Amino acid sequence: MRKKITFGYAVSTVESKLLDNIDFMDQLAKIDDPIVIVNQFRDQPLDASALGQNVQVINSKSRGLSQSRNIALKVIDVDFVMICDDDISLVPANIERIKKEIQKNPDCALYFTRLQKTTGELWRKNYEEGPFSINGLGFKSRRRIQRINSMEQVYNLRFLQANQLIFNVDFGAGSGKFQLGEETLMSWSILKAGGVLQSLPIVARIHPPLSSGSIFSVQNSKAVFAVQCSIFGLAGLITFSGFLLKSLRRFLGERIK
């Protein structure tokens, strides 16, 4: 009989802003699984006294979302970990369904779910209907991982540990270099290590309609270019050109409205 998987949550926040998200805090209080909260701060350390014994709070002077994720993944001791930002909420019943699906195939390196907006719409209109997997280093796999949002990811922590995989601290919100792309590069690292990514067409988290990656800017474009070049090499010039044209059309369309 297969050993039951352990499951936990790695939550990232800055200046204790998590405490302002009452719905998410209430949900965390009802969870029995291990939770690690990393609060990156200068002025507002997070008080852990009111939280349950299953919750570990780390107040860190580090900077950058990737640093926060790495700290949490180093500390938490579970088989699978759901990463969470401080502005989301969970869909608890669906997470239980996800645990059951993971139990069927605990060797998968990364599961990615669906994400829903607080407005009720799905994060993307073109989610695939059924489950599918991504593996290998082919062009299709490299393209497909570009669409996976960090708030869709559930990591096999044992796989990451066995392959010494961590988030690239040059990428992600708060980084000194590139403000996004850390989740895509982690997906790419998993593929290069021989891991399989498996989709689950289940909504696990709910996020506000806008995210840092959905805003068109020179800064974000530089980050996307760096990610594309890391994954595609010289062909990244072509894939980035496609991204730039699509983003410009969307940006100009919104301005006209």
Image: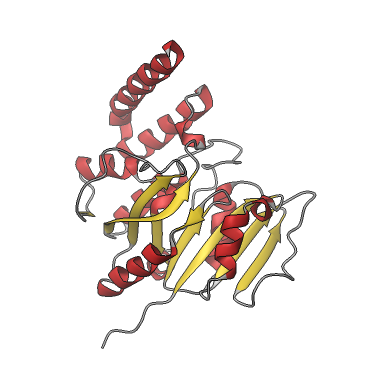
**In terms of image quadrants, where is residue 38?**
bottom right
Left or right for 19, reference 118: right
Q: Is residue 90 visible?
A: yes
Q: How is the image coloured?
A: secondary structure
In the rendered image, the residue lying farthest to the bottom is: 1
Looking at the image, is 241 positioned above or below residue 75?
above
Q: Position of residue 90 (x, y in %)?
A: 47, 58
Query: How many numbered dots are placed on residues in this image?
Result: 0
Looking at the image, is 253 positioned above or below residue 118?
above
Residue nearest the viewer, comparing 6 with 157: 6
Left or right for 229, reference 12: left
Q: Quadrant of the C terminus?
A: top left
Q: Position of residue 17 (x, y in %)?
A: 67, 50
Q: Position of residue 83 (x, y in %)?
A: 48, 58
Left or right for 238, reference 223: left
Q: Residue at x 56, y 41 (%)?
A: 173
Q: Quadrant of the N terminus?
A: bottom left
In the rendered image, the residue lying farthest to the front is: 120
Q: Residue at x 25, y 73 (%)?
A: 104
Q: Is residue 75 visible?
A: no
In the rendered image, the residue lying farthest to the right is: 43
Residue nearest the viewer, comparing 7 with 180: 7
In the rendered image, the residue lying farthest to the top is: 256
Residue nearest the viewer, comparing 230 with 209: 209
Q: Residue at x 49, y 39 (%)?
A: 180
Q: Residue at x 61, y 41 (%)?
A: 174
Q: Position of residue 166 (x, y in %)?
A: 48, 57
Residue nearest the viewer, comparing 39 with 227: 39
Looking at the image, is 120 positioned above or below residue 104?
above
